[in-house]
Image: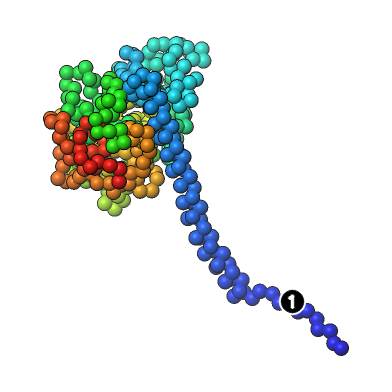
Amino acid sequence: MQTRLNQHRGFTLVELLVVIAIIGVLVGLLLPAVQAAREAARRMSCSNNFKQVGLGLHNYHAAFNQFPMGGGGPSYSQNRLNPNVGILPFIEQQALWEQLANPARINGIDFAPFGFRIGGNGVMGANHTTYPPWFTIIPAYQCPSDPAVPLNSSAFSNVAYCYGDSVLRLFYEVANGSYDQATDRGVFRRSRAKGFRDILDGTSNTIAAGEIPNYLADKSIIGGVAHASNTPGPGAPAGLGNNLSLCTNLVDPLRPTFFAPATVMWNNAGAGSRGGRWMDALPMLCGFNTVLPPNSPTCGGIGGWGPEWEHGVHTVGSRHPGGCHVLMADGAVAFITDSIEAGNAQANSISRNFNNAGEASPYGLWGALGTSIGREANVALP
């Protein structure tokens, strides 16, 4: 009887190539899924941060029967401290709050009182780089999807506060003779504290805060600010900050997420850009108005009115695909898509100075969500 020897057969070259090709296809399918899962986790973390900010605002309101001012603080702060500062004790940042509340000496350096000051006579330019608390990175104000890193400047914030739907006099003092109450339609205002009773549209229908991306010095329309230059030209047309058509026309048609190459930018990438100072109430830095929908351009300054930090179209946005987070006044967090109904930018080419405080927002559902006293009908999150 013959014994048949086992014969070992190897793979042919064709079979090996087929296996390699199949593995390559599977890896190609898997990588986008992994990236999507990572972004979903970052987006959830960002949403949780906004919920923490909402709890901080509500706990502050429970303690003081009002929200923090949209711009307030001691007299030497020039009313430049935004609500991020006021809610620190309510988001488990008590140690940092105590440093701010007692700014006399930190690490042996005397900062009182003007080292703590962040506004007026160029003091901000010096002390946002020298006052230690301003360098403190606060996780609740950071979105993990944003890769921006501060360079020799104060820590960034991805949280901005809603000033309503006007572009004029956003940062005028309430005591200022030029203050126009008809432009005061948001939850927050400089030198004026508001509470639940001031939100006549209902807290579930009114935006309190929103997400903003930080600037990467890349002429991106998110995070970047188109500059209303003192010398108007093709890249900085006169009336830029109050003419929506001029603002949107600066977008590069070949690269719609960037400004056109000739656009004059507010070029201080870092402390002078969107979210560049986590404590600063300037609308250009940590504020917004509900004029253009999320991830649209930000255009500062108004010809004949003033600079970027007082007037202009300041837009929310994020590095999440398709939209950004907003915090409603009732503490709920929603994700608003770029396609939210926001009126017709061409029909409303001149952003209005609301002479009639009861006028409905011309910026559609988006504008209505940003106002607290508009009394618009059928306003609800999409």
- Which is nearer the eye, 271 or 222? 222
* In the rendered image, the vertical position of residue 277 relative to residue 248, given as above or below: above
* Residue drawn at x 44%, y 43% as measured from the top left: 43
Q: Secondary structure at mark 1?
A: loop
Q: Amino acid at mark 1?
A: His
- The mark total stands at 1
Give the image quarter of residue 351: top left
- Furthest toward the right, the residue is 1
Q: Where does label 1 land, which residue?
A: 8
Please give left or right for residue 195 compared with residue 84 in the image.
left
* Residue drawn at x 36%, y 19% as measured from the top left: 64
Q: How is the image coloured?
A: rainbow
- Furthest toward the bottom, the residue is 1
* In the rendered image, the vertical position of residue 163 relative to residue 325, given as above or below: above
* Residue drawn at x 26%, y 38% as measured from the top left: 369
* Residue drawn at x 40%, y 25% as measured from the top left: 59
Residue 66 appears in view: yes
Residue 146 is situated, as x and y percent measured from the top left of the image, at: 43, 40
Residue 135 is situated, as x and y percent measured from the top left of the image, at: 45, 25
- Which is nearer the eye, 345 or 90? 90
How many C-alpha atoms fall within 10 Å of the one at disc 1: few (<14), some, or many (≥20)? few
Please give left or right for residue 366 compared with residue 123 in the image.
left
- Furthest toward the left, the residue is 355
Give the image quarter of residue 192: top left
Residue 124 appears in view: no
Give the quarter of the figure containing the N terminus.
Answer: bottom right
Residue 90 is situated, as x and y percent measured from the top left of the image, at: 44, 24
Residue 345 is situated, as x and y percent measured from the top left of the image, at: 19, 44
- Which is nearer the eye, 89 or 19? 89
